[in-house]
Amino acid sequence: MLAAWWGVSGVLLLLTYAIVRLAPVALDALRGPLGWHHWALLVINVAFMAYSEGYRGFQRSFSPRVATRAAHLGSRPTLLRTILAPLYCAGYFAAPRRVRIMVYSITAAVLLLVQVLHYLAQPWRGILDTGVVVGLAWGVVATFVIALRELGAAGLGPRRSPG
């Protein structure tokens, strides 16, 4: 089970690191003078990101996959999968082709978006980052809770296919 928890913890650390890096930019925007249109975009963006990134992206897709792959790893560890457990749990390797394509595509899109948004001025960048922070925080909580549930029953093996 150590390999399983290393996988989940590594994913959670990566998500938490992103929150820590983005939160100051988001807070900086909220400290500045914001007009009604800024507040309107902030509320819309936070709601959109909570639903699309937090609920649909993490809670309904990514988090269950991480937990299931962690449980699978815990019951059938190999040296490579144990060492690279966070990458294994996220689906970067030893996953169905469809999952790998999705994981690499999302990673590339996020990296591109980070580069583009870096040039956006405040408060616009902070407003967008606030939504991302909310979505990532939802993802951290969802991943942790789902992993606890899945790994708590790990003595039975994974309840779903580790795809």
Image: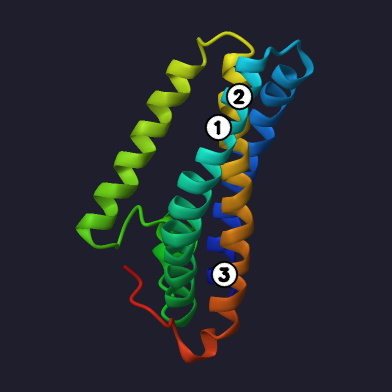
The reply to whether the C-beta atoms of the residues labelled 1 and 2 are less than 8 Å apart is: yes
Which residue: 30% across, 62% down? Answer: 94
Residue 36, horizontal then vertical, whole percent: 66, 16
Q: Within 10 Å of the Cα at label 2, are there few (<14), some (14-19), or many (20+) other Cα atoms? A: few
Residue type indicated by callout 2:
Ala
Residue 62, horizontal then vertical, whole percent: 44, 57
- Is 161 on the left-hand or right-hand side of 2? left
**Mark carried by residue 44:** 1
**Structural distance between the alpha carbons of marks 1 and 3:** 30 Å
Q: Quadrant of the N terminus?
A: bottom right
Residue 31, horizontal then vertical, whole percent: 79, 18
In front: label 2 or label 3: 2
- Is 10 on the left-hand or right-hand side of 104? right
**Structural distance between the alpha carbons of marks 2 and 3:** 35 Å
Marker count (numbered): 3
Which residue: 59% across, 36% down? Answer: 46
The quadrant holding residue 115 is top left
Q: Is mark 3 on a helix, strand or loop?
A: helix
* Front-most of residues 126 and 82: 126
Residue 109, horizontal then vertical, whole percent: 35, 32
The answer to whether residue 3 shows anywhere in this view is yes
The reply to whether the C-beta atoms of the residues labelled 1 and 3 are less than 8 Å apart is: no
| Position above or below: 21 against 151 | above
Q: What element carries label 2?
A: helix
Residue furthest to the bottom in view is 156
**Mark carried by residue 147:** 3
Query: How is the structure coloured here?
Result: rainbow
* Front-most of residues 79 and 154: 154
**Mark carried by residue 40:** 2
Residue type indicated by callout 3:
Ala
Residue type indicated by callout 1:
Ile
